Image (cartoon, rainbow, N blue to C red):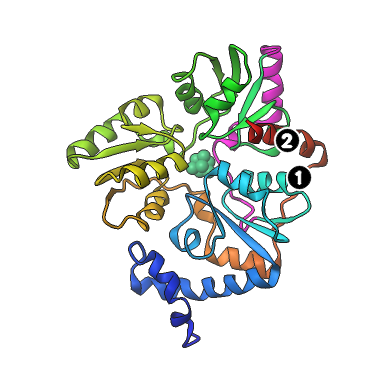
Amino acid sequence: MDPNLIARTASLYQRVRHVIPAMEWPLFAEDIDAILALKRRRHAVILAHNYQTPEIFHCVADIVGDSLALAREAMTVEADVIVMAGVHFMAETAKLLNPAKIVLIPDQEVGCSLAESITPADVHLMRQRYPGVPIVTYVNTSAAVKAASDICCTSGNAKRVVESLGVDRVIMLPDEYLAQNVAAETDVSIIAWSGHCEVHERFTVKDVRQLRRDHPGLIVLAHPECPPSVVAEADFAGSTAALSDYVATRRPSRVVLLTECSMSDNIAVHYPELDFVRPCNLCPHMKRITLANIRTALEEMRHEVTIDAAAAEPARRAVERMLAV
Ligand code: SF4
């Protein structure tokens, strides 16, 4: 190992020292150092979702956030290459908004149970079944599904998007629980699909009550992909950005985030004085992204994300329409 490596990466380690034990740092330092050099050589930026592990999120990413933030920030990027440390639909969204850039995904198999729960043919069937009812599609879908819909939404803006359409009924695809959680907050009637996030659907009311018994004074924050019964038990529900803001502004002394496991680690880096209770539900798709495959993606310029020409234009319109809300 390069004898200067640990010294060169020491300032990065300071950022994550509360969540990564010192003895594990040498396992990460070499890839981090190589990735930082490759980013300069390739004129590349790394976008990382909130569910990425801290060594990616805090040590090599240039832009971090939830799906909405990554979609917005992708549009301002001046680099030639965008590496998406997230799942495939996020890389597609970055490509839709930056068609002239090379977008790389470090692992081609990074799927998502929500994105896989619906096809463009399903969307067309819904349109036939409910003629004239606008179709709002969660960004957690393929470009082809976005192309078949009218407008996209994220968990952060879903209510605003639904109400922006000025109608009394919308179809909202594919996350059944997000649709039900939005329906509870709006007068617009919502027709849902039956997709679920395999991470958030696992949280139960029983879990929440047990956590409160085990950790007195606990503040429970839930993502709206959780079942409505779980959201009803929580103290606050919102997108990953909203959950992060809640912790930043309210500083609950003991808190649990009912969402993907790494999210708590990434926030805890900033608030070591707070007690984060961490029931760990991992997203197996997000966890396919590693420092090693980010490094290989940049070394070999692999795997480039492309979008079918017929889907690209209507999918871009649906995303841009959302960004304009
Ligand atoms: S956490 Fe859920 S919604 Fe997000 S990528 Fe994983 S399976 Fe998809």
What kind of element bears circle 2?
Answer: helix
Q: Residue furthest bottom?
A: 3
> Would residue 95 be found to the left or right of residue 176 on screen?
right
Query: Which is nearer the eye, 200 or 257?
Result: 257
Q: Residue furthest front?
A: 249
When the figure is inspected, residue 13 is found, relative to residue 179, above or below; the finding is: below
Q: Quadrant of residue 14?
A: bottom left
Q: Residue at x 64, y 53 (%)?
A: 108
Q: Residue at x 45, y 70 (%)?
A: 12
- Residue at the far right in the pictured view: 309
Q: Position of residue 244 (x, y in %)?
A: 41, 45
Q: Position of residue 325 (x, y in %)?
A: 62, 30
Amino acid type, mark 2: Ala
Task: Measuring from the top left, give residue 182's x and y in whole percent.
Answer: 48, 23
**Residue shown at 71%/48% (left/top)?**
95
Indicate the quadrant where residue 191 lies. top right
Q: CA distance from mark 1 to mark 2?
A: 10 Å
Q: Is mark 1 within 8 Å of ligand 1?
A: no
- Residue at 30%, 46% (x, y): give it: 251
**Vertical arrangement, residue 286 with respect to residue 18, above or below:** above
User: What residue is pinned by disc 1?
Assistant: 307
Q: Look at the numbered discs 1 and 2 and tell me whether their residues touch, using CB distance below 8 Å.
A: yes
Q: Is residue 259 visible?
A: no
User: Of residues 315 and 303, which is closer to you in this image?
Assistant: 315
Q: Judging from the image, what secondary structure is the residue with disc 1 in?
A: loop
For mark 2, what is the residue? 315
Q: Residue 112 lies in magenta, yes or no?
A: yes
Earlier in the chain: of badge 1 and badge 2, it is 1
What x and y, as percent, mark residue 2? Answer: 50, 86
Q: Which residues are magenta?
A: 105-132
In the drawing, does residue 168 fall left or right of residue 27? right
